[in-house]
Amino acid sequence: MTVWELAIFVILIAALIIVGVRVLKWLFSSKSKWGVNTARVECFKCGATAPIVRKPANLKQFLWGGWTCTNCGSEMDKWGKEV
């Protein structure tokens, strides 16, 4: 392996690490359906807290997160907004 090949390899690895860190930062900070919510969610109607272990009520909740309140039956996304 020549010096130029090694330099290109190091630059490519550094670029991949930088892009990976940026993607992870975006996933944990954006409130889109692609984002990751690590905080507990409260019901927007009655204020009940979602359980730690989530049991999805339908396929949409299974794929994208979300919760159906056990107290009032309202459905919300993983950020606590009404669906």
Image (cartoon, rainbow, N blue to C red):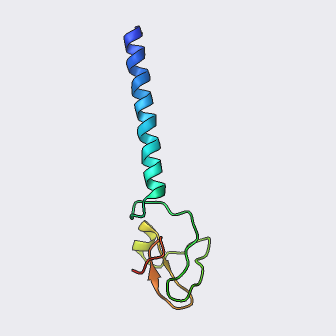
Instruction: Name, please, the residue furthest toward the front.
Output: 29
Q: Name the one closer to the observer, 81 or 51.
A: 81
Residue at the far top in the pictured view: 2
Q: Residue at x 44, y 28 (%)?
A: 13
Residue 35 image position (x, y, % from top left): 44, 60
Relative to residue 26, is residue 80 depicted above or below?
Answer: below
**Image quadrant occupied by the N terminus:** top left
Front residue of 31/3: it is: 31
Residue 38 vertical position relative to residue 74 in the rendered view, above or below: above
Tell me which corner region of the image, top left, top right, bottom left or bottom right, holds residue 46.
bottom right
Coordinates of residue 34 in the picture (x, y in percent): 40, 60
Q: Position of residue 36 (x, y in %)?
A: 48, 60
> Which residue is depicted at the point 47% across and 79% down?
57
> How many discs appear?
0
Q: Is 51 left, or right, of 77 in this rendering?
A: right
Image point (56%, 87%), residue name: 70
Report x, y in % for residue 80.
48, 75
Q: Residue at the bottom extreme?
A: 72
Residue 21, relative to residue 44: is it above or below?
above
At 39% across and 80% down in the image, what residue appears?
83
- For residue 25, above or below residue 16: below
